[in-house]
Image (spheres, rainbow, N blue to C red):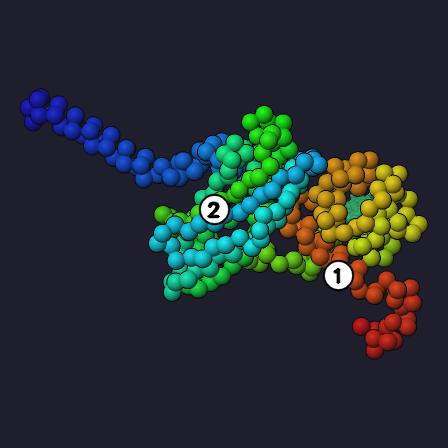
Amino acid sequence: MTPAERKNAIVLGGVIAIIALMLSIVAYSPTLYRWFCSATGYGGTTVRVAADHAKISKREVTVSFDTNVAPGLPWRFAPEQGPVKVHLGQQKLVFFSAQNMSNHAIVAHATYNVTPQRSGLYFKKIQCFCFNEERLEAHQKVDMPVVFFVDPKLASDPTTAAVHDITLSYTFFRSVVPQQGKELSRLDAEATPDPARGETLFTQQCSACHSLTENKIGPMLGGVFGRKAGTAKGYDYSPALQKAGLNWTAKNLDQWLLDPHVFIPGVRMPVRVPDPFQRRDLIAWLEQESRRPAQASLQKPPATIAERGGGK
Ligand code: HEC
């Protein structure tokens, strides 16, 4: 090589390297863009939060759901409810269904966006299928939960203060990295309340202070579902809970377990359950136990055992 040829070779090598770099940026740009957007909330994408919660405000917004499938992806994809009203700060669980209409497994990825765009900053998702590459087997259909809340800061930001309607929009695309696909059916299992899991969670997280049949550090919880708050016989409640004057419905129990001190300031329960699915399963179990005629029978166990046919 003459010095001139060597110089040309270096220039050519440099040009090839730059082109290669540019091509790889283009190839990865959807990922980069998505990453950028979900990290910053830019472009109406929503910010993902771990297990956050905020004070619940009286102000309500209506959230509507919009679903799309990119051309060439043989999936059906739809929201399972119409628009929902939520208080700012209130966690909400909603469902979507997806079905693979084809004869082979397909991995897809959902992108999401929120309109009006600025409200995307305040739209927080705790759990969503949109964070992963999702795989559906041939003809498989699944229900997918999404947990979100709208940050009360929406109301104090002058650019979003007037927003009363928010649309959450999803589009499924065929995945460019199908090898990373997770089975979407894992979410299906979460779509139904599981009282048995609730019982396990109760043993792990509540039984140090609560039992179904007697007052311990906390009041007895047998029959708590539907009971008036602060009324277990013989238990010394905090004045705050005594005066709360509410019934333990599923919704109230959910708020209570999310954070008792935010729900009713001044109460004495030092525990919270940030995971919405754990709360749902705990409540399902408490409800199941409260429906059972066990409370009455516990007061006269011998008769009941005899009625049941001995010792079961
Ligand atoms: C460290 C002890 C402790 C743990 C653990 C605990 N609690 Fe409590 N709980 C309390 C106390 C104390 C109260 C009464 C609060 C008051 O009087 O302000 C209470 C009250 C309650 C009440 C209201 C009952 C009524 O009669 O109004 C419910 C419901 C409840 N707890 C559910 C749970 C569940 C479900 C769990 C498990 C996730 C749990 N608690 C874990 C201490 C605890």
Above or below, 263 relative to 109: above
Q: Within 10 angstroms of label 2, few (less than 14), some, or many (20 or more) residues?
A: many
Tell me if residue 121 can be seen: yes
Q: Which residue sits furthest left?
A: 2
Question: How far across and down, in percent of the image, does residue 8 sit?
Answer: 12, 25
Mark closer to the observer (1, 2): 2
Please name the residue shown 47% across and 32% down the image: 42
Does label 1 point to a residue whose CB lies under 8 Å from ligand 1? no
Tag 2's secondary structure?
A: strand
Quarter that holds the C terminus:
bottom right
Asked if the residue under mark 2 is in contact with the one under mark 1, i.e. CB atoms within 8 Å, the reply is no
Please name the residue shown 86% across and 76% down the image: 307
Q: Which residue sits furthest bottom?
A: 309
Tell me if residue 205 can be seen: no
Above or below, 78 relative to 111: below
Q: Earlier in the sequence, mark 1 or mark 2?
A: 2
The residue at which mark 1 appears reads as 288
Question: How far across and down, in percent of the image, does residue 97 sit?
Answer: 52, 56
Tag 1's secondary structure?
A: helix
Question: How far across and down, in percent of the image, does residue 276 sit?
Answer: 65, 48
Question: How far across and down, in percent of the image, does residue 167 sit?
Answer: 53, 42
The residue at which mark 2 appears reads as 170
